[in-house]
Image (spheres, coloured by chain):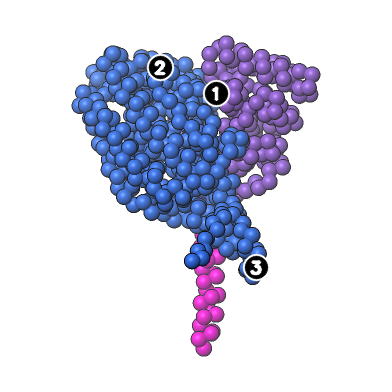
Chain colours: A purple, B blue
Amino acid sequence: MTSEKQAATQARVAAVLTGSNGVQGLAVDAIGIDHDGMVCVTATPEQLHEVCVLLRDALGFESNTFVTARDHGVGREQRFEMFYQFLSVAHVDRVRVRVMTTGDDPEVPTITDLWPGTSFSERECWDLMGVRFSGHPDLRRLLMPQGYDHHPLRKDFPHVGIEPDKLYNQWDEERRAAFAISEAERLEGKR
Amino acid sequence: MKSTTFDYRPGFADSDADDPLSGETIEVNMGPQHPATHGVLRLGMDLDGETMVRVDADVGYLHRGKEKTAESLGWAKFFPHTDRLDYVQPLINNIGYAMALEKLAGIEIPPRAEVVRVLLMEISRIAAHLIYLGTSSIDLGAVTMFFNTFKERENIYSILDAYTGHRMNNTYVRIGGLYADVDEKVEGMMREFLTQFPARVDEFEGLLTGNRIWYDRNRDVGVISPEEAMAWSLTGPILRGSGVEWDLRKNEPYCGYETYDFEIPVGTVGDCYDRYLVRVEEMRQSCKIALQALNRLKDTPGDVLAEDRRYILPPRTKVMSSMEELIAQFKIVTDLCLPKGEAYAGVESSKGELGFFAISDGTADPARLHIRAPGLMNVQAIPLIAEGRLLSDIVAIIGSLDFVMGEVDR
């Protein structure tokens, strides 16, 4: 992005988000430019959904590029930082939204009602980071098996894993138990 | 003589109403080891007769924790892992990752490196599209196509072998450029391949485009409207197949793509057949770009690696003769510290927008590396277009969405 383009995008986004029909409590300096030159809106979890509605309907960001989170480390009051990135095909533009959350089990509103394509991204974020998306219609794990206890991308999760064989052993026992019953039934039927 | 015609109506047929079993669904599991799912994808389906009422795509069988691995490996040592994302086009992954890091560090790469990168990306795109063409057509019964396309792909792999020393998983891109320059032998091999290739594409098209079976099984199957495609985060040939003229090479040019002469093919209907046509035309356009890049090689002399001892590896020859350069190489490989901040770089891969979102906290350990995999979004769209269609269409749909599970699961 050239710098004129950035400035134009920044002005356009700021005009809508902080205008008269804009988001309550969003200051003009919340719309800045990131290290890589992308326009970035810093919002709170409460403001997020409203910001996204305006981004989609008033500013023409038709597509979501990704939803992801960053773990700032154990013991931080504001531990998880959410990153959303949107793409406008009509304006050839991108914008990033970042949201700071508090606590070890944060919750942010879902945006699947606005962009259905964010469903997998949010599921992945819940799976790997443990960020809960309130209102998501189907918040299951995406990559790790269902029933897994941990969120691997958190900084307190070791690289070697925690009890990597636990689920496998559990399934194996279940399978063996089920097989033993059916084997007993089969033998009984023979007699 | 009275002739009876078969009224073919895909979707929920009204004529099922007098069927005593109508409305009763059975659950069918497809995959994760099914040859037509192109990797370890599992589909849970509810079938009403032959109609798919519910489709649930279950991914994660190839999850290797690449993003977590990056955090312990460091920036420089993660390059070989990017090869293993979308393993049919390793060089595009390398370049996407390198671009994100270059953005983070604020590095400009030399013009010759840009030209060679374009050349490599387009060659890789052709190889990836050939895989699409081969596998999607063998799934629909056109076995000849598979052998034809894999024969061509073999030529590309011979070229890459001669250039990088590996057929697959090349890891030939570095921060700030490339590991080594293209030599004359490779240039000659590339030129030979690229001049004969358009004729081969015509041959492929002759076998498929007008083929009645191919047409019937792809036309009006898996239709995605432009609005849907954008809302479902689809990019690449699928978005273009739906008629949206969006290509990062044109709209957000990188590596000097704005200076090349090429066109973006778009579809009109947004079905599997349009996606096929878009990909075939893209192969021709890629061939055109690659030839232009090849012609530019002799006009752009110079190095293929930028010079910056903070972030960029010293050239191999200097490492072998100078102690300082050896130390610099060691420092860069083991603990490369990039400036604090966030950077996103997206490249147009053969599957769509492949993005790397890198966050650095200024230390040698990456704070976060998120890989925006286009394949994941393509898999996500399976229920959208498969629900309500016949079971036999799922094979055409999976083929046309063209994903590689290495990238989907990461």
Q: What amino acid is found at the position of numbered circle 3 in the picture? A: Asp
| Percent position of residue A75, x then y | 65, 33
Pick whichever of labels 3 and 1 is earlier in the sequence. 3
| Percent position of residue B240, x then y | 50, 33
Q: What amino acid is found at the position of numbered circle 2 in the picture? A: Thr
Q: Are marks 2 and 1 on the same chain?
A: yes
Chain for mark 3?
B
**Front residue of B151 and B43:** B151
Q: Is residue B359 above or below residue B309?
A: below
Pick whichever of labels 3 and 2 is earlier in the sequence. 3
Helix, strand or loop at label 3? It is helix
**Front residue of B403 and A42:** B403
Q: Nearer the viewer, mark 3 or mark 1?
A: 3
Q: Which residue is mark 2?
A: B259
Q: Which residue is mark 1?
A: B342
Q: Residue at image x 48%, y 27%?
A: B247
Q: Residue at image x 62%, y 13%?
A: A8
**Front residue of B277 and A38:** B277
Using the numbered discs, state the Cα–Cα distance from disc 3 to disc 1 in whole angstroms.
Answer: 61 Å
Helix, strand or loop at label 1? It is strand
Q: Residue furthest left?
A: B185
Q: Which residue is mark 3?
A: B18
For the residue carrying disc 2, how many other residues have a C-alpha within 10 Å: few (<14), some (14-19), or many (20+)?
few
Q: Which residues are magenta?
A: A168-191
Residue B39 circle label: none
Q: What amino acid is found at the position of numbered circle 1 in the picture? A: Glu
